[in-house]
Image (cartoon, grey):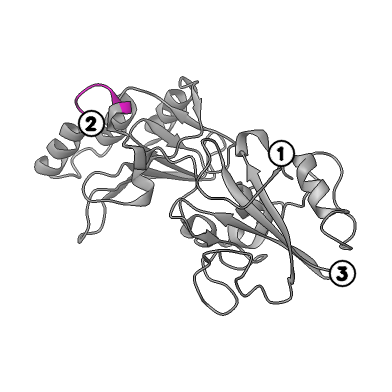
Amino acid sequence: MSVVVTLHVFSGRPDPSWELSKVQIEELSERLGRIDKATLLKPPGIVGGLGYRGFSVRAVREVALEPEMYIHAGVIDRARFDANLQTNSSDFELWLLATSGLLLSPDVEAYVRHELSGGDLLSKLSPDGLLMVPPYNPGKWNNDPTIQSQNNCYNYANDKITNTFAQPGRGSGRSWTQLVSCETDVAPAAQRDGQIPVGPPSTTPREGHFIALVLGVGYDYHWYRLDANGMWSHKPGATPARNTDNSSRPIADPRNCDRGPYSIFCGFYHCVPSNIRIG
């Protein structure tokens, strides 16, 4: 059992990491428990940039903590939960910084403290940082063998790690049963989960993100997801998440990319993860 904190701050040098003590792990759990504001925002540091980009926390066999979290600008991304947490105080990040002990050089610690000063954290969230649309972050799905093998295209499309190889309709109580056409089974099952049919996306939604369903009649179904960079990505079954089609080309539109045996395009859907239940 362990908890490792990584400070994301360097470009050329490896980011510094350190392990929390038992007492610090207990305090981390308590601090998280005191934050009760939920949000659909993503930490802006998750998409990169130069300088201070927040902290990641990786917990191994700690029942009171999520296996992975990313914290930046007051937003705490809990990876497997429906909604993230948000605080408008820098106290949480300053506490994480303090747990580094003497590991950091005085210059690096002073720089991060300066970045965390100035009061209102919401003012640090630029429009590009207010990410309700998931970023393309394949490592979240590919780096852990359990996550990669036990989550499929429907998990990925919904940006929800359940380790159940989620099936349309199962989370809402009645799963799909056949693959005759788009309209008869998989699509209605997904709508029972909360997916909302929409037309072709021309922009990003104010809440949630867009996904797309395709079908190979009598064969299988597959889902794609529109990411914050304006391109589409997907996770074919238990294989790695990727942003290219069957011909290894970037996916600008799932309607005309190489989809292999999934010849029928069923349609686009608006997915709001906090309103979706998958299982």
Which picture quadrant has residue 19?
Answer: top left
Q: Nearer the viewer, residue 200 or 81?
A: 200
The span shown in magenta is: 116-122
Instruction: State whether residue 163 is above or below residue 118.
Output: below
Would you say 180 lies left or right of 253 here? right
* Mark 3 vs mark 1, CA separation in Å: 26 Å
Main structural element of the magenta stretch: helix, strand or loop? loop
Residue found 37% across the figure and 31% down from its top: 24
Tag 3 residue: 218
Among numbered discs 3 and 2, the one appearing first in the sequence: 2
Tag 2 residue: 116
In x, y percent, where is residue 35?
46, 22
For label 1, the crowd category at 10 Å Cα-Cα, with few meaning under 14, some 14 to 19 and many 20 or more, is many
Question: Is any part of residue 159 visible from this angle?
Answer: no
In x, y percent, where is residue 101?
22, 37
Among numbered discs 1 and 2, the one appearing first in the sequence: 2
Which picture quadrant has residue 241?
Answer: bottom right
Residue sitting farthest toward the bottom: 247
Q: Is residue 135 magenta?
A: no
Q: Nearer the viewer, residue 211 or 81?
A: 211
Tag 1 residue: 277
Disc 1 is placed on an element classified as loop
Would you say 30 lies left or right of 165 here? left
Disc 3 is placed on an element classified as loop
* Mark 3 vs mark 2, CA separation in Å: 55 Å
Give amino acid for label 3.
Gly
Q: Is residue 118 magenta?
A: yes
Residue found 45% across the figure and 23% down from its top: 30
Give amino acid for label 1.
Arg
